[in-house]
């Protein structure tokens, strides 16, 4: 006979987290949050809305691919643009606007529709599951984000809040993607206790590489952080390289061009000199993955805060070494393109 972790009495959950933390050598509050992340994925993808969702981002690399060895606390999801806006996409195979004017119309419609969909379709799914399972958590909806604020058994330092953020986007199909198994870090460590498990549809790691590499490229041209823990992208790119996904992404020229075209249309950005970021050039021999000046200083500070709070499970790569690794990734990505010309 086994008991579900989230169904245990508070003290039993606290004790179980303590045992798991001792055995894994990881902070108990991170293991607890990991349970809620997996529970949220299991709940979403078991519901009818799950057929149009894709799990992506750093958390997918950690939970679905076991590529990165860091705690990734929030859940990034794509709701298929073809499901949210079939009237706009029509028969367009790549689900991409043809002009800037069309992009503005699509983006405006998505901004209006997505928060309503989160409130009307996602919130009831999570609320019903919490009620049926009798779990001590509340829900907040803020635009395209839904927060599950859970009653924590193991408070941390305050850097990682007892809340799981589900952030939804709907400007792509999320493809290529495939079904992958996801389990909790603490699974199998405690006799008689079971933890949540899920099988979400997950964005292919090669696309995630290009998504992160182009986000880093933008930062290098702008020199400003987009919130805390932005340094995670450099860590993730290095780990993707270690696992062989970067090299595979270099070779997939069709995928690289698709990501560049998508970002050029939906996520146009300006450099520090106010010129538009050229994503197509970035994936075709002009990729930059190492910042300089004040950008490098702010990135290093952000990275050290991640390390201090235990978000990197293994010995953290020194910042300078991480930058060297990413510079090498960029050099190989650029050389790969030039060797084909």
Image (cartoon, rainbow, N blue to C red):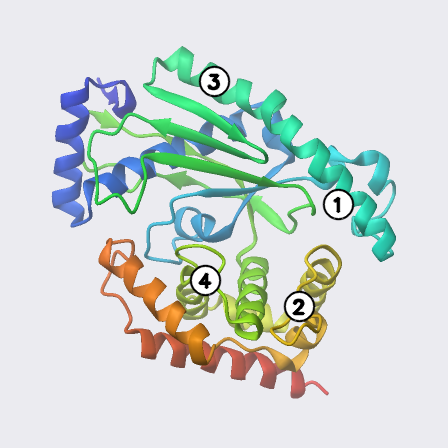
Given this view, does label 3 or label 2 mark the residue nearer the observer?
A: 2
First along the sequence among labels 3 and 2: 3
Dots 1, 4 in contact, CB < 8 A: no
Residue visible at 29% across and 70% down? 317
**Which residue is label 3 attached to?**
127
Task: Report crowding for label 2: few under 14, some 14 to 19, many 20 or more residues within 10 A (C-alpha).
Answer: some
Measure how far apart labels 1 and 4 are at the Cα level. 25 Å
Which residue does the numbered mark 1 point to in the structure image? 107
State the image quarter where residue 214 is shown. Answer: bottom right
Q: Which residue is mark 4?
A: 233
Q: Does the CB distance between marks 1 and 3 fall below 8 Å?
A: no
Q: Is 5 placed above or below 89 here?
A: above
**Which secondary structure, mark 3?**
helix
Q: Is residue 126 above or below residue 238?
A: above
Which callout, 2 or 1, points to the residue nearer the camera? 2
Closer to the chain start, of discs 1 and 4, is 1
Q: Are marks 4 and 3 in contact (CB under 8 Å)?
A: no
């Amino acid at each position: 006979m086994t008991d579900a972790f989230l169904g245990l009495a508070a003290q039993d959950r606290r004790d179980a987290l303590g045992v798991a933390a001792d055995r894994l050598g990881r902070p108990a509050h991170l293991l607890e949050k990991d349970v809620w992340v997996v529970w949220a994925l299991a709940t979403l993808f078991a519901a009818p809305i799950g057929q149009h969702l894709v799990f992506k981002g750093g958390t997918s690399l950690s939970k679905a691919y076991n590529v990165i060895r860091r705690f990734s606390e929030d859940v990034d999801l794509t709701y298929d643009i073809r499901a949210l806006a079939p009237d706009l996409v029509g028969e367009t195979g790549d689900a991409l606007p043809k002009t800037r004017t069309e992009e503005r119309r699509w983006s405006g419609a998505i901004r209006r529709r997505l928060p309503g969909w989160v409130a009307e379709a996602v919130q009831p799914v999570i609320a019903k599951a919490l009620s049926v399972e009798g779990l001590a958590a509340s829900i907040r909806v803020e635009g395209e984000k839904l927060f599950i604020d859970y009653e924590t058994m193991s408070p941390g330092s305050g850097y990682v809040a007892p809340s799981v953020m589900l952030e939804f986007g709907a400007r792509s199909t999320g493809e290529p993607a495939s079904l992958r198994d996801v389990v909790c870090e603490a699974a199998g460590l405690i006799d008689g206790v079971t933890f949540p498990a899920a099988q979400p549809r997950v964005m292919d790691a090669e696309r995630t590489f290009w998504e992160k590499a182009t986000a880093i490229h933008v930062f290098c041209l702008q020199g400003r952080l987009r919130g805390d823990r932005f340094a995670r992208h450099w860590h993730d790119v290095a780990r993707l390289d270690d696992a062989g996904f970067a090299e595979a992404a270099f070779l997939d020229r069709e995928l690289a061009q698709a990501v560049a075209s998508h970002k050029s249309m939906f996520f146009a950005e300006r450099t520090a000199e106010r010129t538009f970021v050229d994503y197509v050039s970035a994936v075709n021999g002009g990729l930059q993955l190492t910042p300089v000046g004040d950008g490098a200083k702010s990135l290093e500070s952000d990275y050290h805060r991640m390390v201090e709070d235990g978000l990197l499970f293994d010995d953290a790569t020194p910042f300078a070494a991480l930058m060297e690794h990413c510079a090498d990734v960029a050099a190989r990505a650029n050389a790969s393109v030039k060797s084909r010309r």
